[in-house]
Amino acid sequence: MTTPEPRVRAPSTAAKGETFEIKTLITHQMETGLRFDSAGKPIPRKIIHAFSCRYNGQTVFSVELHEAIAANPYMEFYARADESGTLEFTWQEDGGAVYTTQQTLTVT
Amino acid sequence: MATAGRQRGVTRRALLSAAGLATAALAMPMPVRADDPELALVEQLFGSTPVPSERLRLEMPPLFPNGYTVPLAFEVDSPMTAADHVRSVHVVAPHNPLIHVASFHFTPASGRARVSTRVRLAKPQNVIAVAEMSDGSLLMAKTWVVVEINGCG
């Protein structure tokens, strides 16, 4: 299986107090555990089960994902620009792997 | 698991992970309303009665060919202030093999309680969203979606 790859589209600057949109995606099969291989054996579940967006260390948005979230989970959400800093995005996979990416935000 | 806002107890999470209506009914016995099984399901999952509200708008296509990647968006009308905001929105698909879709957690710093994502649906059904507000109230919305391909196989 190829390594899950996070992608984020968020503005690099925002006006103070402005609410801005963030689009995120991670490439991931989101194996539900409901499928069977060609030999008839069940394929074990392996999904991204948690996602969070932290802004200067504070979690502003998070998700508990279940099997019904589509493959390559796409999340579009909002955050309010309070101060300059870092947006950190984290995805947690069944089995403990963690994928993360960051982006700086300048608030004027 | 990194989540914002209040974590619900283990009981609810275990309940929500349980596969299907029958298990939910066994775990938390409550009188089942024959006239509205979906409301009964939501009452069993949340332990209280959510109020259908137009403040919670669930946006999904009424007909979508591919059940593997159905667009889902919702928004809650809320000022998102410390005194009045959305804590969480939970989405369930009662006719999927595993009914819980996702739980989304917000803070006032979210600015806007709007999310867009994509989900898998097994068959035509009402997708249900329940919003937990900062004052403890529960809002509910549902929308009927027909998919032509089972996205859960």
Image (cartoon, coloured by chain):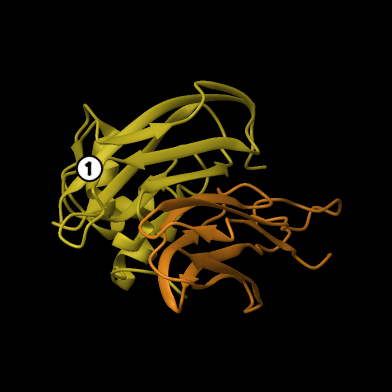
x, y percent for residue A89: 57, 68
Residue type at the position of mark 1: Leu
Query: Looking at the image, which residue is at 17% across and 49% down?
Result: B30
Q: Taking the image as drawn, is residue B126 in sight?
A: yes
Subunit bearing disc 1: B
Q: Quadrant of residue B41?
A: top left
Q: Nearer the viewer, residue B34 or B1?
A: B1
Q: Nearer the viewer, residue A43 or A41?
A: A43
Residue lying at the far top in this picture: please name it: B63
Q: Quadrant of residue A30?
A: bottom right
Query: Looking at the image, which residue is at 86% across and 51% down?
Result: A38
When the figure is inspected, residue B113 is found, relative to residue A44, above or below; the finding is above
Q: Nearer the viewer, residue A44 or A94?
A: A94
x, y percent for residue B141: 30, 34
Residue lying at the far front in this picture: please name it: A108
Q: Taking the image as drawn, is residue B94 in sight?
A: no
SS of the residue at dot 1? strand
A17 on left or right of B61: left
In the rendered image, the quadrant that contains the N terminus of chain A is bottom right
- Which chain gets the yellow colouring? B
Query: Looking at the image, which residue is at 54% across and 67% down?
Result: A105
A69 on left or right of B142: right
Local crowd at mark 1 within 10 Å, few (<14), some, or many (≥20)? many
- Which chain gets the orange colouring? A
When the figure is inspected, residue B117 is found, relative to residue B13, above or below; the finding is above
Query: Looking at the image, which residue is at 52% across and 25% down?
Result: B61
In the rendered image, the quadrant that contains the C terminus of chain A is bottom left
x, y percent for residue B7: 31, 70
Q: List the residue tagged with mark 1.
A: B139
A103 on left or right of B89: right
x, y percent for residue A60: 40, 66
